[in-house]
Amino acid sequence: MSVKKVYDKQPDTFEFTKENLVLAENILNKYPKERKKSAVMPLLYLAQNQNDNWIPLAALKYIGKFLSMPYINVYEIATFYSMYNLSPVGKYFVQVCTTTPCLLRGANEIVKACQKKISKNENTISENGMCSWTEVECLGACVNAPMMQVNRDYYEDLSKNNIEKILDSFMQDDPIKPGSFRNRKSSAPENNKINGNGINNA
Amino acid sequence: MPKITVNNKEIEFENGMTVLQACELAGAEIPRFCYHERLSIAGNCRMCLVEMEKSSKPIASCAMPATEGMKIKTNTEKVEKARKGVMEFLLANHPLDCPVCDQGGECDLQDQSLYYGFDKSRFKENKRKVKDKYMGPLIKTIMTRCIHCTRCVRFATEVAGVTEIGAIGRGENMEITTFLEKSMESELSANVIDLCPVGALTSKPYAFEARPWELKKTETIDVMDAVGSNIRVDTYGWEVKRVLPRLNEEINEEWISDKTRYACDGLLKQRIDKPFKRENGKLIECSWDEALNIVGSKIKETDKNQIGFHAGDMLSMETINSLKELAKKLSIPNYEFREKPFYLNSDNKMNYIFNSSIKGIEKSDCIVLIGTNPRHEATMLNARIRKAFVTKKIPIISFGDPGDLTYDYTNAGNSTEDIKKLLNKENETSKILLNSKKPIIIIGESALELDSAKFILQGIKKFLKENNFINENWNAFNILLQNASSVGAIDLGFFEKNNSFNFFNKLKNNEFKLLYFIGSDNLDFIKSNEFIIYQGSHGDRMAQIADVILPSPAYTEQNGLFINLEGRLQKSNKSTYPPGSSKEDWKIFNLILNNLKEDEIFKNFVELRTDTISKIKNHTDFDLLPKKTIQDLKFESGSFINESIYVNEIDYYFSNSIARSSKTMSDCRAARSKKLNKITGS
């Protein structure tokens, strides 16, 4: 990983939509007036949601003005956290976990499949514009390793047998249902094994 | 006082000190990169690790508050091993380019690696490479060398008051940059070069010019504004290579403004090195004798009432003193140092100096600005106001609109009517003022240029005296003059005393036949038939219209006395030699007198200096504030006219002839006017 690249084709302006402006005001109300800078992270997230899952520079400036804080401070925060995207991502943004548990359970195969199906390099949008992928650190679903996050959904218990099918569904803009791909309910034991509370897997 | 034991030595320390400061008190030197006395504590370089009793791990002494009974060890094996470990990490990604690095010889990392560095690296992976950033025409960046101490970030935010530098990314990928690589909009920006403990931020104009050990260093005084910042001039041969700040808690702490630091390349350009005379509309070189003959015969044949002398903004007191004696000897009545007609009252020294003193600003609890923009008129003084603002959140109120001052202030009105209300205790400002204990009122030259200037100056003085803000311990009355020569010239009486501005009227109506400009380039003047003699160091505005030019040294090339705006007398020292056949100003005056077959005024420089010091009002000693004179205050009344207070814009980077000759200053000016926004670094 290196410092996030700022996209070179930037829109000139950014403004919250009417609905988001209401949301932004609600966020602001959560913080004391003299500490409204604290709202910078939820507002960046709001801007990212509004703008196809990435934050343009105009939005950084807009939020800087909105919270009367220096641009550089907004920029620092946006580059610090890995969940803010400063360049466009695909309609389906695939984040593959490659931290130790997932890696031990074969996350490399998932990465290889992404390279084959989506794009050779990470953070590059596929030719049909549908997908982009990136490696990320632990997403907190180690029990279901290997796993990946696509937009807001977790796809778990992946293997090289089913991953290509899943990725194809995104590429064809017909996303498959998220969840465990070994028919587990959340992280409960599979094949009717009994879990710690003495309950069978439903 | 609480006690702390450092290396088995028990010492007392003040409450609120950190372990690092206590160790320094005990004489134990602690290595550091991120810690700086004048900045907030970051604690991220980990170089200052020391051993504390009852702590299993070494502690970062810069961020640990010292407490009663602490037992600290700074010289144990454990401490040395810890520091060596930190140093190895710092050097892991630091390039080995000391031979081509401008910081070499004055680099903290170089010095400290002598004590804590390993002889070889155990780092086998790839070293990181960081793209260099553009930070304006003054700062050259080699960001691979950065060790992320964040001193520059803290300086920009805290002292300069422009939050423009920041650290983007995180962990190994952290990079220091300005937002979208714009140049830093501050008059103090180049101080980050001094602050940078490594060679990541170095001086762009000084890049590859010289090594620190081959420079001759002279301690002297800055003349770019009336603050009188203490500087060190580094010369190589006759060339001034760079100007650095010198520590003076009373005046500039350890910062200087960009103009002070970088106008020095103007000392090498546009220099007048020989006398010139005008023949058939063209300036041609001539000998000193020829030039002096022309000057002598012109002075002889012109009616003395039609001769005017004007002293420039960067003249030493000796020059002004000998010039005044010259005028006296030749019985010339018209002389002036002001560049614009502003009201001046020299009855009492209190009436034209900054009485609260620059250091006193920190004690103040309310500051009122009247027609002044301290950011451009006295940058270092503005940094003090900001310091008071940041540490104590004091209210700052301005009459007139000075623009961005790097701190928040309230505008209390833009007309003299508002000041009248203040004096009659009719508005909010007067309430804030009366409720404060140590207020400061600063009257700028822009306010003194108004028709009701006398009303403002005398009215404010009376108001402050009546409310006991002018007493033995505190004097809230301040005048902010802009030029280095101003206070000295007033002390020596080199101006028209009655405020009738005859000189300026005559100048405007072209009533002079002969004008003698000594280092004076800022006058608003359109030439018609005057014969103009220019004596100075730079071929600037006045030299272009002059008929005879006499070369004289610039401020780094002759000894001189300067009084700063507080009334502090300081010595400026000769650091290099003037080019060509320049002669010192007072010697030129003697040569003119010789030519006129008159007696010389001063036989030697010692005599001149002694005479000059004897003429200083309320003189105490060098580097000290003048005696207080608040007993015999006189109050006059001035006429009131309702007019708007307009704060004159200063072309900051072009405010004097040296700055105008400087390439660096014109680059800064262009960058400021946003023309050069997209130029990438060198």
Image (tube, rainbow, N blue to C red):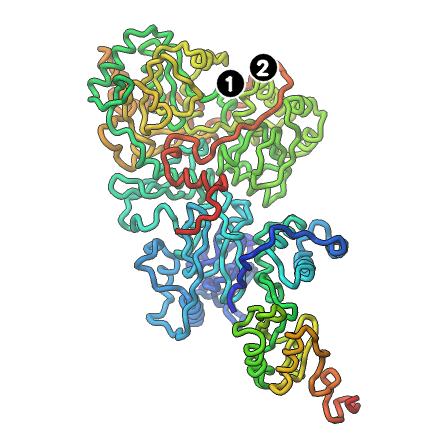
At numbered mark 1, what does the secondary structure look like: helix, strand or loop? loop
At numbered mark 2, what does the secondary structure look like: helix, strand or loop? loop
Residue displayed at 60% across by 34% down? B367
Q: Residues within 10 Å of mark 1 (few under 14, many from 20)?
A: some
Q: Which mark identifies residue B345?
A: 1
Taking depth in this image into account, of B206 and B439 the one nearest to the observer is B206
Residue displayed at 25% across by 14% down? B294
Q: Position of residue B666 (x, y in %)?
A: 41, 38
Q: In this view, does A202 lie to the left or right of B609?
A: right
Can the viewer see residue B269?
A: yes
Q: Position of residue B203 (x, y in %)?
A: 39, 48
Amino acid bearing label 1? Asn
Q: How crowded is mark 2: few (under 14 residues within 10 Å), some or many (20 or more)?
A: few
**Subunit under mark 1:** B
**Subunit under mark 2:** B
Amino acid bearing label 2? Glu
